[in-house]
Image: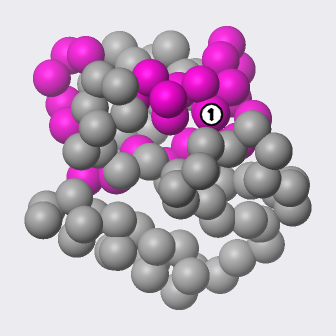
Amino acid sequence: MVETSSTKEVLAVIESGLLPDVVVTSYLMPVMPSTDLARLLMERRPELPVLIISGYAEDEGVPLGLPRLTKPFGQRELATNLTSLANAFRG
């Protein structure tokens, strides 16, 4: 697991060659919205799953087909989402 504090750091980690099983990002991130990050990652690494975590009920601005988990959620729901995304990534 690699923790970053901004979308800019996420991009730097990915560009350094690290390819995680899943990118989990908060809807509200410093520097660049996570939806823009997801779009960039889909362009650069289309096979890399991205999960957006949000406290907002609306889907406005979240690209269609992009997995999203809305707060509040439990550990089991998070684990299920991460497992599903990682398994899809591994093919």
Q: Is residue 83 visible?
A: yes
Q: Residues within 10 Å of mark 1 (few under 14, many from 20)?
A: many
Is residue 39 rendered magenta in the image?
yes
Q: Can you give x and y, in whole percent of width and height, for residue 16 in the image?
A: 20, 16
Is residue 41 positioned above or below 87 on the image? above
Is residue 28 rendered magenta in the image?
yes
The residue lying furthest to the right in this view is 57
Q: Residue at x 29, y 23 (%)?
A: 44
Give the colour scheme shown: one colour
Element marked by disc 1? helix
Q: Can you give x and y, in whole percent of width and height, for residue 26 in the image?
A: 65, 43
Q: Is residue 20 visible?
A: no
Amino acid type, callout 1: Thr
Q: Which residue is mark 1?
A: 35
Q: Can you give x and y, in whole percent of width and height, for residue 64 in the image?
A: 59, 50
Q: Residue at x 79, y 72 (%)?
A: 72
**Residues rendered magenta in the picture:** 15-41
Is residue 79 positioned above or below 8 on the image? below
Question: Does 38 sit left or right of 55 as displayed?
Answer: left
